């Protein structure tokens, strides 16, 4: 069936970040390329569309308790792309802490070497600690970061479109390799960037690498409507997910795009086993790894509640919540997903933390393979998303279980692909090739 | 025999950049990952220490005539490292157009995923066009670029050293993953950079990735003496190469290092065939691809001579040359190598261009496999270099000929390794592991 896409987040030890404490876990697997290569082969055998890794360019402040930020995603996923054939790679990069020429070039060239499997997940970076690694005295505010992100993607897109498809003439007799009049500078001058271009080489197989966007704030949604091919979303309730998808499609249409040209991929933390009983047993095991006091404090901050106002087992009701979440708190998407849960009825921090995979905010789905498959199918059929980004609760176990137990059910039901079809990620996602640049003559005159 | 190292430059179509015009050449091979993977496997079969690729982040201005700058070296060589086991990768990166935190992180993490095969070739970028791609109205002068490069490498090195080897405690019972007091911020504040650190993960197998330096100006040599593990050099005469190696070893000693801890690798363009006659035939074929008028103009500029002062076949004598080369011309190393040739006797631009591989400045070595092996051996034994960076005249032909015909001779003579010994590139080059950071307690108090 067209349009049911699956990505896999390869974060390890898993989306329960404290899973490294389990007896069988290797705490150093997050630095072990052999481990990740095995994950990539499992994912490719299961015909997963793409692997994904989040990132922030700083040491995360919970290093006492869990690995957190690991290897640079460009380095790690670039390696995994090299040892696979069909798997797409969705690489998180910051528009706040990169330069657009460098990023445009690296992703375009990754598209060449992967033969059309490169995707960039643009984030504005919500980690204040990153600022001090890049010469800033303070982390820019969200509005500034998104203004920069808009301009960043405008520059990157124009750079990707800079070479006319027929620019390389390769005329051996005359010794003319390329026609410079078909290779266009962009000469961008804006608030944040001044970039001349063009890139050193022509576009890769996808024309433009796939652009993914993940932020749920107004700034993030506006950016997604204009630029994103795929939007990663977070939702704890089906109604919220449906409304989000409708909204993002409307925004794409308002930006002059076809609504089918933007796909949503709903993040879901999956804890799956052969039987529900076994899954429930592992769930308890994972809960026991959580530092509940610290996570409660983080949750209260995220919801805009005073420190210490609620203990782990004190119910929080809708009218306990402030109307607005203070700036500088957690991501807007995570806050809003959690608030939607509380709106359904009072919840304790412990419940919220457990349902949100140790506090990371995404919905936790626990069960047998059939239960997980049923859940994904029903959300998909309700219009909650065009696909899912599977975030294994504990990577080493839940990826293998998902690939070996859940995927075959989804394939039997005709929901998920049994074979990679299109050669490129863009083609597989049903996204159009970007429009080619204007005809040469017109641009050359302009 | 210890200390005879071989790197391979994988520039294509070759160091005769116009070789794409030859009847059998594929003009688009420079974008073809399958082509490069085949080169990497040939190099690894031949036990070559590392592959190398130069770079400048801009469209090169000779695109009408030849490919020039190709794929981003980090992307391309990262891919080649992933599909090989022992081959080192020497990746050119600009200290002028990168940020040190990002570069330190990417190379450290490449060291993890390659299990100790990462090397960065730091350049300050001599291509003025790059400036306009990174928001600068003009390309910084050489003195500024090298001042920035010093500070850049100081920051990068301190970031690489930031985690004490015992920082990860992985205490499952207590839930303590790492000891933050053993992970050190650098809090660097300098003329160009303000960087807090630390990096998100600990150092890779090499401790620090290998640092390569390639600039021959006073600024470049000073940088090399202080930071470089390997120095790429250019010399048209043996005396020049010997003097250079002595100089760089003295500079390392003056910086408090052991002179054996810096290795020189002499770039040499190799055109090799089964017989000398065949090599000479191919040499003429390659000369015929050269746009001699344009290269003559570039050569005169490089030597500080007025445009049009000499035709391709007018001899230039030593006293025709100005005392100093104007700023903004070609690299100091290339100018100085060419001037050394002219000092031996008058040369025409055509001769100089042909001896310098189409004008790129490195020495061209043409002959049978035995002749090439004899030449390399005699230069090595004269103390001209610790090894060579082989730059195939025409990559697709000369790499294979070098690997299949020359390497076995060097191995038979006991000069070059028959097997990869050390697991890491640093170990193989006979370089020490960097000193570990100060003991934790001392740093924590400081």
Image (cartoon, coloured by chain):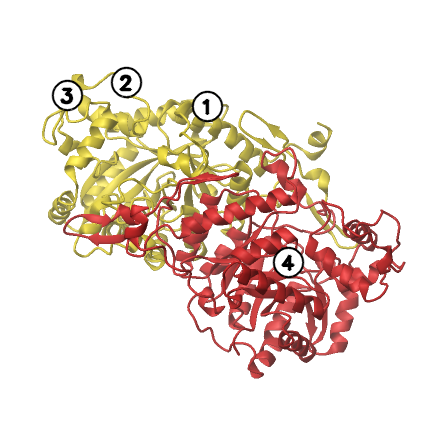
Chain colours: A yellow, B red
Q: Position of residue A446 (x, y in %)?
A: 70, 27
Alpha carbon separation for disc pair 3 and 2:
15 Å
Task: Using the image, name the chain to which the residue with label 3 belongs.
Answer: A
Is disc 2 in the same subunit as disc 4?
no
Q: Nearer the viewer, residue B355 or A225?
A: B355
| Crowd tier of the residue under label 4, counting other residues whose Cα lies within 10 Å: few below 14, some 14–19, many 20 or above | many
- Is residue A441 shown above or below B439? above
Instruction: Say which mark, if any, is on residue A324.
Output: 2
* Nearest to viewer (mark 4 / mark 1): 4
Q: Secondary structure at mark 1?
A: helix
Instruction: Say which mark, if any, is on residue B321.
Output: none
Alpha carbon separation for disc pair 3 and 4:
66 Å
Task: Using the image, name the chain to which the residue with label 4 belongs.
Answer: B
Residue that appears at 75% across and 69% down: B282
* Nearest to viewer (mark 2 / mark 4): 2
* Nearest to viewer (mark 1 / mark 2): 2
Alpha carbon separation for disc pair 3 and 1:
37 Å
Mark 1 and mark 3 in contact (Cβ < 8 Å)?
no
Quarter holding residue B285: bottom right
- Residue at which label 1 appears: A253
- Residue at which label 4 appears: B12
- Is residue B379 shown above or below B193? below
- Residue at which label 3 appears: A317
């Amino acid at each position: 069936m067209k349009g049911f896409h699956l990505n896999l987040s390869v974060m390890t030890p898993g989306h329960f970040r404290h899973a490294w404490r389990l007896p069988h876990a290797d705490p150093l697997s997050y630095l072990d390329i052999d481990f990740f290569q095995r994950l990539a082969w499992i994912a490719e055998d299961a015909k997963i569309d793409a692997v994904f890794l989040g990132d922030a360019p700083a040491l995360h402040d919970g290093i006492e308790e869990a690995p957190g930020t690991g290897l640079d995603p460009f380095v790690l996923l670039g390696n995994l792309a090299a040892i696979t054939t069909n798997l797409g790679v969705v690489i998180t990069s910051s528009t706040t802490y990169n330069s657009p020429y460098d990023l445009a070039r690296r992703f375009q060239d990754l598209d060449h070497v992967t033969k059309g499997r490169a995707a960039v997940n643009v984030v504005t970076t919500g980690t204040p600690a990153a600022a001090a690694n890049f010469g800033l005295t303070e982390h820019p505010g969200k509005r500034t970061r998104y203004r920069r992100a808009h301009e960043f993607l405008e520059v990157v897109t124009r750079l990707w479109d800079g070479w006319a498809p027929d620019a390389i003439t390769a005329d051996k007799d005359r010794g003319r390799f390329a026609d410079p009049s078909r290779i266009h500078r962009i000469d961008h001058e804006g608030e944040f960037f001044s970039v001349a271009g063009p890139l050193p080489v022509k576009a890769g197989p996808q024309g433009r690498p796939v652009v993914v966007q993940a932020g749920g704030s107004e700034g993030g949604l506006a950016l997604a409507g204009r630029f994103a091919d795929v939007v990663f979303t977070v939702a704890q309730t089906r109604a919220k997910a449906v409304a989000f998808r409708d909204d993002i499609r409307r925004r794409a249409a308002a930006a002059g795009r076809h609504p089918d040209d933007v796909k949503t991929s709903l993040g879901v933390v999956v804890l799956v086993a052969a039987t529900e009983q076994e899954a429930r047993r592992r769930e308890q095991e994972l809960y026991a790894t959580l530092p509940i006091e610290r996570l409660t404090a983080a949750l209260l901050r995220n919801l805009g509640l005073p420190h210490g106002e609620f203990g782990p087992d004190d119910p929080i009701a809708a009218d306990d919540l402030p109307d607005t979440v203070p700036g500088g708190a957690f991501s807007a998407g995570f806050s809003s997903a959690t608030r939607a849960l509380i709106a359904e009825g009072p919840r304790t921090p412990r419940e919220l933390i457990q349902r949100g995979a140790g506090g990371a905010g995404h919905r936790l789905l626990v069960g047998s393979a059939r239960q997980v498959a049923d859940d994904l199918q029903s959300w998909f059929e309700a219009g909650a998303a065009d696909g899912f980004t599977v975030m294994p609760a504990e990577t080493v176990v839940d990826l293998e279980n998902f690939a070996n137990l859940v995927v075959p059910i989804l394939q039997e039901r005709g929901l998920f692909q049994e074979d990679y079809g299109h050669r490129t990620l863009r083609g597989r996602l049903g996204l159009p090739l970007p429009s080619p640049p204007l005809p040469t003559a017109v641009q050359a005159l302009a």
